Image (cartoon, rainbow, N blue to C red):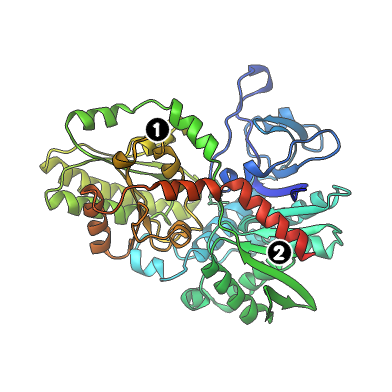
Amino acid sequence: MTARAQLILANRAFLDHEAPRWADSPSTASSGGLLAAVRPVIQPWDGREGTTWIGVGMGRFDREWVDARGYEILETPRGPLRHRRLFFGSATWQGHYGEVANSFTWPLFHLVRADLPRLTGYYPAPQPPSSAGWQSFVLVNRAFAEAACEEDGAQTCWVQDYQLALVPAMLRERGYRGRIGFFLHIPFPALDVVRPYLSPEVCARLRTIVEGMLGADLVGLQTPADVERFVAAASELCGAREADGGLEVGGRRVRVGAYPVGIDPEEVLTAARRGRVATRVRQARELGLPVVVGLERGDFTKGIPERLRAIAEAYRQGLRFAYIGIASPTREGVEAYDALDRQLERDAARAREAAYWVGCPFTQVRASVGWEDVVALQRDADVVFTSSLADGMNLVPLQAAVAQSLRPADERAVVLAGVDAGVTRVFGGDGQDGLVGVDPLRQESMVEGLIAALEGRPVRISDRLIHLVRERDARSWGERFLGDLEEAC
Ligand code: G6P
């Protein structure tokens, strides 16, 4: 029998209701890396058994769809899902999500190799949360732990990501009797790199976060490098001792391992078969120009300014190509994101000017684009240019590999990815399979990578890469994690 997660706890709900009940129009599925990886793992609810998903009610019309305790049965492509939403007031949400999760933990945890605030000028320094903000974070985590404890008989609780890092320890304190798994979708930082930000107060917060994660029976991270950094931090901050396959802490064994996430290849293929060729792609083809695309959430970890500078430099060197860059709005209202927008405008203006002098079309927009259009661009690109400064995995290269499988092997794209993104570490960025690691902190590396990709010098996306991405999909990720969690208990 395959392992099952009876309870999935994620900050994000499975989907947000953005339409009222009477409107009879389907609610848009929320997007993002966490959901792409976790959604395929659910087991249909048969009235007695299956997955119960607990997430925050963020949709405008959520309350209309749920009962007094936040429950509903959602119809999903994978069958019915028992779903519960927890609701919080705006001050609590701002403290939990705006302050602790996204102005402190997110920027801090992405400092894996270098002090990015110092090196980039726009990457925000991790902001120590106010004590009210921290209390909100504790309150939201506690609400999740309590909701999980109300689910009598659920034998496995799988807690997702940094927003809920305190939940595993809280479950243990409350005597939760099932197995507790925790998975961190983002990187775990190197203590030596984050040390300039570790005031005694910040250090205490980080220790509490790590202790929270250590409440789990199994802590999963994306890559072996993340595991190493986590083990080192748990030893230094929490006095944990390395033990076979994990850590020993407070007389307990905590298994720790690398479980790189995957995607749902069928979902990508369906969209790739349906998606129409974008007008901008058609125009570029008419001009005989290759198409370079950059698509992601407009996040300061994605290295978008560095990419725009490399693109400007390539145009200045006389290279001719069309660029389509789309940064989708994300975490709006979180202050840490403001500086990025200003930087993007400046770098996009320079790249646009350089493109103009060589007569090439250049687009960089901030827009939410529908799933089919995103996949169509990934399918039609000649170069998929990602450049994360750090990234848990980065699903764009994986989606692009599957979308491009519809093209003949000799017409496929080359995918560029940041050397510190999980995808490069896991799938190898030496170019042999059409995935090339570039260092966003070194402009020569970015420009050389782009030029080589435009010249088709590295091998294009190979059948081998496509096969690997299909094999290590989201479902097999879930099964591996849950299988190991069963074994760990
Ligand atoms: C991305 C990251 C996930 C994170 C999610 C949160 O997808 O890869 O690790 O959980 O963002 O997104 P949100 O929109 O809820 O802030």
Residue 436, by quadrant, is bottom left
Q: Position of residue 321 (x, y in %)?
A: 20, 41
Name the residue carrying label 1.
376
On screen, 1 above or below 84? below
Q: Residue at x 78, y 40 (%)?
A: 50
Question: Is residue 327 rendered to the left or right of residue 140?
Answer: left
Which one is nearer the viewer's eye here, 165 or 390? 390
Residue 298 visible here:
no
Which one is nearer the viewer's eye here, 171 or 421? 421
Residue 326, by quadrant, is top left
Q: Position of residue 34 (x, y in %)?
A: 58, 48
Question: Is residue 146 rendered to the left or right of residue 114?
Answer: right
Location of the C terminus (image quadrant): bottom right
Q: Residue at x 85, y 59 (%)?
A: 176
Instruction: Categorize mark 2 by other alpha carbons within 10 Å: few (<14), some (14-19), many (20+).
Output: many
Q: SS at mark 2?
A: strand
**Distance in Å between CA atoms under marks 1 and 2:** 38 Å
Q: Position of residue 44 (x, y in %)?
A: 74, 36
Residue 191 visible here:
yes
Question: Is residue 205 rendered to the left or right of residue 465?
Answer: right
Q: Residue at x 40, y 36 (%)?
A: 367
Amino acid, disc 1: Ala
Amino acid, disc 2: Leu
Q: Position of residue 29 (x, y in %)?
A: 58, 34
Instruction: Categorize mark 1 by other alpha carbons within 10 Å: few (<14), some (14-19), many (20+).
Output: many
Q: SS at mark 1?
A: helix
Name the residue carrying label 2.
218
Question: Is residue 244 rendered to the left or right of residue 120?
Answer: right
Query: Quick one: label 1 or label 2, which is nearer the N terminus?
Result: 2
